[in-house]
Amino acid sequence: MDTIITIYRSGVDNGLEVTGRYESGAWVNVVNPSPAEIAELVTRFTIPSDFLTDPLDVDERARIEREEGNTLILLRTPRREATEADIPFTTLPVGIILTQGLVITISLTEVDVVAEFLNGKVRNFSTGNSTRFVLLLFLRTSLLFLRYLKEINRMTTAIENDLHRALRNVQLIRLLNMEKSLVFFITSLRSNALMLEKFNTSGCLRMNEDDRDIFEEVVIENKQAIEMANIYTSILSGMMDAFASIISNNLNVVIKLLTTVTIILMIPTLVASIYGMNVELPFQHSQFAFLIVIAFSIMVSILGIAVFWRKEFF
């Protein structure tokens, strides 16, 4: 993936305008920077290099660090993968660096929460108000988690409908991948919750009354997302156990049916084999011998079908 470094400023009607200057009140969005570009940013803003490299590690946990007047907020965000991907949803870290009056966001690849801001889905935010900008990033991340959790629930319901008549493990594997997504979500949400607690107590950003209301909403939405993820995980685990038994039972039903059909087909085969022997047999000199054998085979087969029907083998 190519490197993307774009500088934005809030323009008319709270829209974003692309600018080419690193200046106070700007938002610098960095995606997959090269080592040379990281070194350039470190030199320009005098920030620790690990502030720029840590967010590029997909396993990095959410946290807050302050060093030399610079603040790093590392946030875990949800990401919808491509349609053909085995695991539909994952999480990725996004680094939010506050330095010299501007905000730098850095990530390994384009993330959905940043796209919400770039696509104009977030209203009433300004790149010049770093506190409000960071809080809105927190809020949109929590809302994205909730939205994707609902999508996981809908996708699980669709798979459940297929499982009622499934004989193979394809649907169970799809459910397992859904469960992996939920595990990623729960781990990231809990990490974000710890980060939010430290954010509240560290005082790294000054919050007015309106900002405090947004922060409380972020905490509530994050807790709700954790509860939803836990509930969906419990439901999914029980569903996988139940449907594993259903698939096994469906297979047993098919095997029982095939066994029954095989036994029924063996009856005329047995009769024909006996009357094919080169010995004296009843009705062998009768002109109706063939019809008698066929009729006898049909009668015995019907009797066998009736017996199996009564025992509910069909």
Image (cartoon, rainbow, N blue to C red):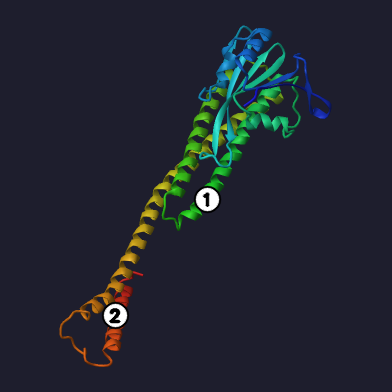
Pinpoint residue 160: horizontal percent, then vertical percent: 49, 52
> Could you tell me residue 27's position as x and y percent?
72, 20
What amino acid type should be assigned to the residue bearing mark 1? Thr
Tell me: residue 264, above or below residue 238.
below
Q: Amino acid at mark 2?
A: Leu
Q: How many marks?
A: 2
Q: Is residue 11 left or right of residue 278?
A: right
Question: Would you place residue 252 above or below residue 217 in this image?
Answer: below
- Looking at the image, can residue 219 be seen? yes
Q: Residues within 10 Å of mark 2 (few under 14, many from 20)?
A: few
- Indicate the quadrant containing the N terminus: top left, top right, bottom left or bottom right: top right
Q: Is residue 269 above or below residue 117?
A: below
Q: Does residue 135 appear to the left or right of 164 in the view shown?
A: right
Task: Please say if 252 is above or below 83.
Answer: below
- Along the line of sight, the residue nearer the viewer: 188 or 4: 4
Residue 303 tag number:
2
Q: Which residue is found at the position 73% from the left and 33% from the top?
A: 119
Please state if 77 lies on the left or on the right of 295 as rendered. Answer: right
Cα separation, mark 1 vs mark 2, equals 44 Å
Left or right: 283 as drawn, with respect to 19 = left
Q: Quadrant of the C terminus?
A: bottom left
Q: Pinpoint residue 41: horizontal percent, then vertical percent.
A: 66, 12
Residue bearing the label numbered 1 = 157
* Residues marked 1 and 2 touching at CB (< 8 Å): no
